[in-house]
Amino acid sequence: IGGSLFVSSNQAPFSIGTDPDCFFPGTSPAGDTIGGNVIISQNRGLDSVFDNVIGSNLVCANNTPSPVGGGNTVAGVESGQCSGF
C-alpha cells in the first residue's frame, strides 16, 4: 500500500500481514508493506498485525479486544495498544 491504512469500526476479526496461525509450517512469514501510517481503532474483532514494514506510525486505540502482533518494522512510533509490536 503506497499510502496509509485506516481500519475502523469493524465487527469481524482481520489480519494485516501474516497471521502466524495461517501460514504453512516450514514457510517464512511475509507481511505487507505500507508506505504511510497504520491506524487501527474502534474495532470489535480480534485483530492481528504481524511481520509488516510500515513507513510511518503504527497506532491502535479503543479496540476490544486489544490487537495482537509482532515482528513489524515501523519507521515511526508504535503507540497505544500496538506498542511493542
Image: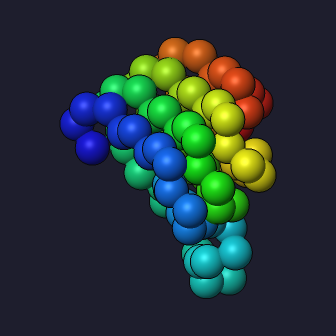
Expressed as whole percent of the image width and height from the top left, the position of residue 72 reads: 60, 40
Q: Quadrant of the N terminus?
A: top left
24 with respect to 84 (left or right): left
Between 76 and 5, which is closer to the camera in this rendering?
A: 5
The part of the image, by quadrant, that contains residue 59 is top right
Expressed as whole percent of the image width and height from the top left, the position of residue 7 reads: 44, 45
In the image, what residue occupies the spot 56% across and 62% down? 11
Expressed as whole percent of the image width and height from the top left, the position of residue 74 reads: 54, 27
Residue lying farthest to the left in this orientation: 2
Residue 64 visible: yes
The part of the image, by quadrant, that contains residue 77 is top right
Q: Quadrant of the C terminus?
A: top right
Instruction: Answer above or below: position of 23 versus 49.
Output: below
59 with respect to 67 (left or right): left
In the image, what residue occupies the spot 70% across and 25% down? 80
Residue lying farthest to the top in this orientation: 76
Residue 26 visible: no
Between 3 and 39, which is closer to the camera in this rendering?
A: 39
